[in-house]
């Protein structure tokens, strides 16, 4: 029989084929059979995924059945069940013509099946939880038919848990091939409105990635992939408010510290956006590979960046904060991204500045102010002791400042903007002239000491 159907073994090995896709007899055990054939034991190339890992009472959840583009399935049966039970829960809504609803266990619209002539590698349906009752963890379970002799049963989705709060993703919910990021570390966006979260999950076949990001609304949130820890040569996706006042997704490429260039969104689908309770979120699936100068492909390793900031009339402004991964990583390798630690060269810069102006500089001034009288008459190298100590620690202050200045510019190789580099340059200039002024200072016995030297 060439006609492909989805069937179930009931109390007896009964075969019932329906070209319309009606498979009521399959609802109890959700198994597929074709005239004595057994289901495949190898992992299914087809998967069942949801856009979220939590749900609320009466909330719509989008469920996706998908597989490699080169390997479509010709039949399917999908049902939602309570974890640890065989009882179907909730109800489904379907796109017109692509599927048919079933009434299983006397529950209307509790399962979905294919219709005659179905042949696709992707279908999306919507599931809604019960409006009331004992809400438990839910899992979606499906069977897939590839052809008249090849089929899989009991293909399940990740568990969907119930929450009284906002439905959202969490770092702990990521499974399979992918990466996730949260800031603060291990925060849960379903609980905290101040949680920034992003995940990337490789779909079956390795040709598409599902991205999700959420965070407090300021104007936009964005993530990108780079070959280093600095802005420039980065592949970026932005979730923000567009010029029409709607939340949308943009694809951008950055070449430096200027505003990234908008590039075509490309083959992006299943775009879902929201702005609720001052929390913005976007999710989408794309087959567009990560592409930066010199490197491309999902399997390559990149530094991961996450930023957020304001926008104006749909144009993103310079971000307020950025989070960068400590090492390179590839999406197919499951990993939780940690926030970048300060590089050692920046730590050295800060340490030297603290030593210069909180320790040696202060010590030099105190020595000149108090040791002059306390150690009066004590000499070293034919100079007053206080003067030798003062000169020594002040020279250390200048040396530490110069080294710190060189280190930070060698690291950034650019002007970072803001007040900090301006103040740093002023400190460097004053530090450079301080020993020159000290050498020009005349002695106490000089006839111009009162009129000129006091100025120094």
Image: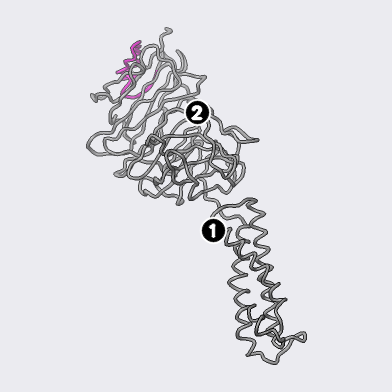
How busy is the neighbourhood of tag 2: few (under 14 within 10 Å), some, or many (20 plus)?
Answer: some
Image: magenta residue range: 8-32
Q: Quadrant of the C terminus?
A: bottom right
* Whole-percent x, y for residue 361 in the image: 62, 74
**Element at badge 2?**
loop
* Whole-percent x, y for residue 108 in the image: 24, 24
- Residue at x-position 40% and y-position 41%: 169
* Whole-percent x, y for residue 91 in the image: 28, 28
Note whether 240 is above or below 121 in the view shown: below
Q: Nearer the viewer, residue 374 or 303?
A: 374
Q: Nearer the viewer, residue 380 or 451?
A: 451
* Whole-percent x, y for residue 364 in the image: 63, 78
- Assess whether residue 86 is covered by the magenta stretch: no
Please, which colouring scheme is shown? one colour
**Which residue is outermost to the top?**
1
Prevailing secondary structure of the magenta residues: loop
Note whether 437 is above or below 248 in the view shown: below
- Residue at x-position 67% and y-position 54%: 410
How busy is the neighbourhood of tag 1: few (under 14 within 10 Å), some, or many (20 plus)?
Answer: few
**Residue indicated by mark 2:** 204
Note whether 384 is above or below 3 in the view shown: below
**Residue indicated by mark 1:** 419
Q: Is residue 72 left or right of residue 425?
A: left
Q: Nearer the viewer, residue 55 or 321?
A: 321
**Which residue is outermost to the bottom?**
377
**Element at badge 1?**
helix
């Amino acid at each position: 029989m060439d006609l492909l159907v989805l069937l179930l073994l009931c109390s007896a090995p009964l075969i019932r084929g329906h070209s319309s896709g009606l498979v009521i007899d399959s609802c109890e055990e959700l198994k597929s059979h074709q005239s004595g054939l057994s289901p495949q034991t190898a992992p299914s190339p087809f998967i069942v995924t949801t856009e979220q890992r939590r749900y609320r009472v009466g909330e719509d959840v989008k469920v996706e059945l998908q597989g490699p583009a080169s390997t479509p399935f010709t039949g399917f049966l999908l049902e939602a069940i309570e974890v640890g039970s065989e009882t179907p829960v909730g109800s489904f809504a379907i796109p017109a013509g692509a599927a048919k609803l079933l009434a299983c266990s006397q529950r209307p619209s509790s399962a979905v099946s294919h219709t005659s002539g179905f042949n696709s590698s992707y279908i999306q349906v919507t599931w809604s939880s019960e409006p009331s009752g004992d809400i438990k963890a839910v899992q979606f379970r499906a069977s897939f038919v590839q052809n008249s002799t090849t089929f899989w049963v009991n293909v399940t989705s990740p568990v969907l848990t119930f929450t009284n709060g906002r439905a959202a993703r969490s770092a702990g919910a990521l499974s399979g091939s992918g990466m996730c990021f949260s800031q603060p570390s291990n925060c849960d966006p379903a609980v905290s409105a101040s949680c920034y979260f992003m995940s990337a999950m490789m779909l079956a076949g390795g040709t598409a990635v599902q991205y999700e990001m959420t965070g407090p609304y300021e104007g936009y949130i964005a993530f990108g992939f780079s070959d280093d820890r600095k802005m420039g040569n980065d592949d970026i996706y932005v979730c923000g408010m567009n010029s029409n006042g709607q939340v949308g997704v943009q694809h951008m490429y950055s070449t430096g510290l200027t505003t990234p260039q908008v590039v075509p969104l490309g083959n992006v689908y299943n775009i879902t956006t929201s702005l609720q309770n001052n929390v913005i979120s976007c999710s989408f699936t794309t087959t567009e590979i990560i592409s930066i100068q010199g490197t491309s492909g999902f399997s390559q390793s990149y530094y991961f960046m996450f930023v957020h900031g304001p926008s104006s009339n749909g144009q993103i402004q310079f971000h307020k904060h950025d989070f960068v991964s400590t090492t390179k990583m590839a999406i197919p390798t499951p990993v939780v991204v940690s926030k970048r630690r300060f590089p050692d060269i920046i730590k050295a810069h800060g340490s030297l500045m603290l030593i210069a102006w909180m320790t040696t500089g202060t010590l030099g001034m105190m020595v000149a102010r108090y040791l002059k009288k306390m150690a009066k008459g004590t000499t070293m190298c034919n100079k007053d002791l206080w003067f030798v100590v003062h000169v020594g620690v002040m020279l250390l202050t200048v040396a530490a400042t110069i080294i710190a200045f060189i280190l930070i510019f060698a690291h950034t190789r650019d002007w970072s903007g803001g007040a900090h580099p301006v103040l740093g340059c002023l400190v460097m200039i004053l530090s450079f002239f301080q020993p020159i002024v000290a050498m020009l200072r005349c002695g106490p016995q000089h006839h111009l000491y009162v009129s000129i030297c006091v100025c120094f």
